[in-house]
């Protein structure tokens, strides 16, 4: 499941993705396969957040879905290689100031 750092635009460094990169229907994808040769009952297509399919935290999320269920998981590159850089959330946060953050928290 997502960790609190995911919502802050922080890339996880405590684990390494276990899946493989592949092309599915012409899109780059990260595929988290099932362990021990289990038969898949389907596939989970994860729509990645603004950080994109190469973001380590999105890949670790796909790994977790594959580990807990009987479904391989794949976040594809729906953004055509134009994911949001990790520095953008921090930059937006610093520009909004404390008042902007308070209004977001009250929603």
Image (spheres, grey):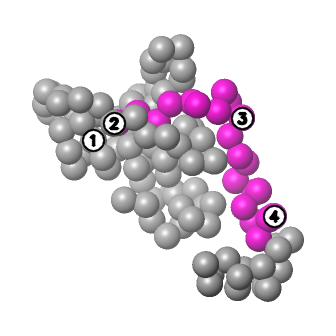
Residue in view at x 70 percent, y 85 percent:
102
Secondary element at image label 3:
loop
Q: Is residue 18 left or right of residue 7?
A: left
Quadrant containing the N terminus is bottom left
Can see residue 19? no
Outermost residue, front side: 107
Question: Could you tell me if the residues under marks 1 and 2 are in contact, i.e. CB atoms within 8 Å?
Answer: yes
Residues at marks 3 and 1, CA–CA distance in whole angstroms? 26 Å
Residue to which mark 2 is pinned: 44
Q: Quadrant of residue 17?
A: top left
Magenta highlight range: 73-93
Residue to which mark 1 is pinned: 66
Residue to which mark 4 is pinned: 91
Secondary element at image label 1:
helix
Q: Is residue 10 left or right of residue 95?
A: left
Closer to the N terminus: mark 1 or mark 2?
A: 2
Question: Could you tell me if the residues under marks 3 and 1 are in contact, i.e. CB atoms within 8 Å?
Answer: no
Classify mark 2: residues with Cα within 10 Å, few (<14), some (14-19) or many (20+): some
Residue to which mark 3 is pinned: 82
Q: Which mark is residue 100?
A: none
Q: Is residue 100 left or right of residue 21?
A: right
């Amino acid at each position: 499941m997502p960790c609190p750092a995911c919502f802050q635009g922080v890339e996880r460094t405590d684990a390494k993705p276990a899946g493989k990169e592949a092309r599915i229907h012409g899109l780059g994808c990260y595929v988290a396969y099932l362990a021990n040769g289990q038969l898949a009952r389907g596939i989970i297509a994860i729509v990645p957040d603004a950080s994109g399919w190469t973001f380590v935290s999105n890949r670790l999320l796909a790994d977790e879905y594959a580990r807990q269920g009987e479904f391989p998981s794949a976040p594809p590159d729906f953004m055509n290689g134009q994911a949001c850089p990790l520095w953008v959330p921090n930059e937006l946060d610093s520009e909004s100031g404390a008042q902007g953050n308070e209004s977001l928290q009250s929603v």
